[in-house]
Amino acid sequence: MFQTTRRRLAIWYTTVTAIVLLVFAIGMYVYVRGTLIERIDDTLNHVVEVVSRSISIDKIYLPGTNDRFEINVAASFKDDSDRLDDDRIDLELFNASGKLLWSTLREPLNLPVWIDLDGETVRVGNDRILRQITAPVNKDGVMVGFLRVSHPWFEVTKPTELLLVDLSIGTSLVIVSVAAIGWFLSGLAIEPVKASYQQLKQFTADASHELRNPIAIVQTNVQVALTEEPLSPQQRQQLQTIERLTRRLGRLVDDLLFLARQDSSVVTADFSSVPLDALLMETIEEQQLAAAAKGIELKLEIIDPIADPSELAVFNLSGDWDRLVRLFTNLLTNAIQYTPLHVDVPGEIAPHQRLSQIDVQLKQIIRQNTPYLQVKVQDTGMGIPSEAIPHLFDRFYRVDPARTASSSDISSGSGLGLAIVQSIVTSHHGELSIDSQVNLGTTVTVIFKSHII
């Protein structure tokens, strides 16, 4: 239990830290990438500003027409198109109609030309990406051409890729370190709680053990007193009440002692190959008298196994005989206590009554080619409200005190029976489920892994 709590604390601590680190890493990546793009755009804008001032524009006079401006490429640039460097800034000069006049690129980009002063990222071919700014070239308020400046994109991708690798490695190392530290700190935090819980369990076990003898002595003395004569009816009734209460108190002490030892693992289970069919026969035989006293029919049905029926020990499982007997005894005792003598049959205009019954079914089931043993205990009792089912395994939990107070047998329960059942099923690595409907009955299903020898 404490290991599970410690594991959950460490996982939550690590998860929260990982989320914070991931948010920080993403924010850092976005910030650095944006800063690099902004720096490149500033560089491109500066180049546009410088180159625009060096462009020579000639005014052409034609008779009978308005004056026209043309870019003088020879006067504006030196022909250095043969120089090619991957990390340099490339220039392209277009006339007003978009025709390429001059370029530092070895091959034209074949991209449409439009004014874009904010910068855009374009892909050229399969493996080349450029950051570009396209600015107009004006003369006396008349646009005479376009200037496009391109910068290689790898100056953004290379640093960001390195940053991504560094952030990934750093975040992973920090998360692993935090997980180890979280596991250590959660162990320190839970140690005082564990010590207190161990002391409480030890006290419960010691107190339960010390109470057994006095309770047994009181019960014996009361039973002896009941055999003595003469006793008035009032005295006999009082002694019978004391005897019944001491018997109930004895059961409660036994249950507390069992749970305390189960929790603290003081007594280890003696696992061996247990024939579940024989165990159920013996348990039902022991409960037949109690069921008959209430007029309840108690039946056992063993369904032929899916595997070869001739195979030996097909209904065997690895478990502790005594604990399994206690498990099914508790289930049958609950079923008997909560099942009235007669049950109204619903759904009819004039409802009639039928005798109550408890059916126990043992069958073999197959899951992923693995054999399991399934036991169902089904009664026709008063049933359990759906909102109470999740709390049935809580210690000392009662479904409805008003309902249980009406029966002395029911009220004699300790409220620990199903908690003991769950503890035994868990120790045998089994599954336990309850399905119930009010006034229709309850079905308890227990599943164990088969142990065929």
Image (cartoon, rainbow, N blue to C red):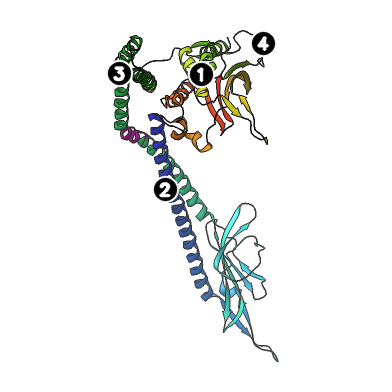
The residue closer to the viewer here, 384 or 57, is: 384
Looking at the rendering, which quadrant does residue 351 occupy? top right
Q: Amino acid at mark 2?
A: Val
- Which quadrant does the N terminus fall into? top left
- Which quadrant does the C terminus fall into? top right
User: Which is closer to the viewer, label 1 or label 2?
Assistant: 1
Q: CA distance from mark 3 to mark 2?
A: 54 Å
Crowding near the residue tagged with mark 1, few <14, some 14–19, many ≥20 C-alpha atoms within 10 Å: many
Q: Is residue 53 left or right of residue 213?
A: right
- Horizontal and vertical percent position of residue 226: 35, 12
- Horizontal and vertical percent position of residue 439: 57, 33
- Which of disc 2 and disc 4 is earlier in sequence? 2
For label 1, the residue is 328
For label 3, the residue is 211
Q: In this view of the protein, can residue 317 be seen by the observer?
A: no
For label 2, the residue is 20
Q: Which mark is residue 309?
A: 4
Q: CA distance from mark 1 to mark 2?
A: 51 Å
